[in-house]
Amino acid sequence: MQNKIKDIKKYGVVAKGKRELIKHLRGEQLTFRETLLAKCYDCLGYYRDGKMDCNVPNCPLYQFMPYREETKKAFSDEQKVVLQERMQKVRLKRVPKTDSFAVAH
């Protein structure tokens, strides 16, 4: 593992996932997001060819790829309506803050 860390420090480009991969190789705990970044960094050879899209849409992690060129799709009109309705319900469920000093005795 130490040799791989040395290689990353020597040849690896400063990019999303570098710190996370080194952290993993040291045996430290990673969050889910850190794990994804570390895997992409490792899979793409430490981004030595540059920070770019891997162009492997069949990879199950591709949707999380940090340098993916494919833009995120916008919501359809139907999805927007559903989201607006959900947000209205959430707002209605919120309990208004009360001033604890204004309680009548």
Image (tube, rainbow, N blue to C red):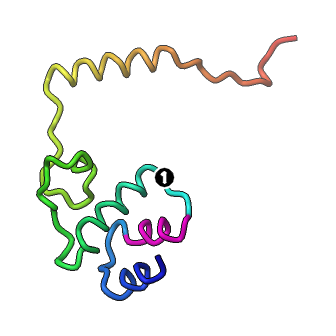
Q: Residue furthest bottom?
A: 10
Q: Which of 95/66 is in front?
A: 66
What residue is pinned by disc 1?
A: 31
Q: Which of 24/75 is in front?
A: 24
State whether residue 56 is above or below residue 21: above
Magenta-drawn segment:
18-27
User: Residue 95: x and y, percent?
Assistant: 59, 18
> Could you tell whether 91 is left or right of 96 in the image?
left
Identified at 32% across, 72% down, the residue is: 15
User: Residue 49: x and y, percent?
Assistant: 17, 78
Identified at 41% across, 52% down, the residue is: 33
Picture quarter containing residue 45?
bottom left
Identified at 55% across, 58% down, the residue is: 29
State whether residue 59 is above or below residue 96: below
Label 1 SS? loop
Asked if the magenta segment contains residue 19, the reply would be: yes
State whether residue 19 is above or below residue 79: below
Identified at 47% across, 14% down, the residue is: 92
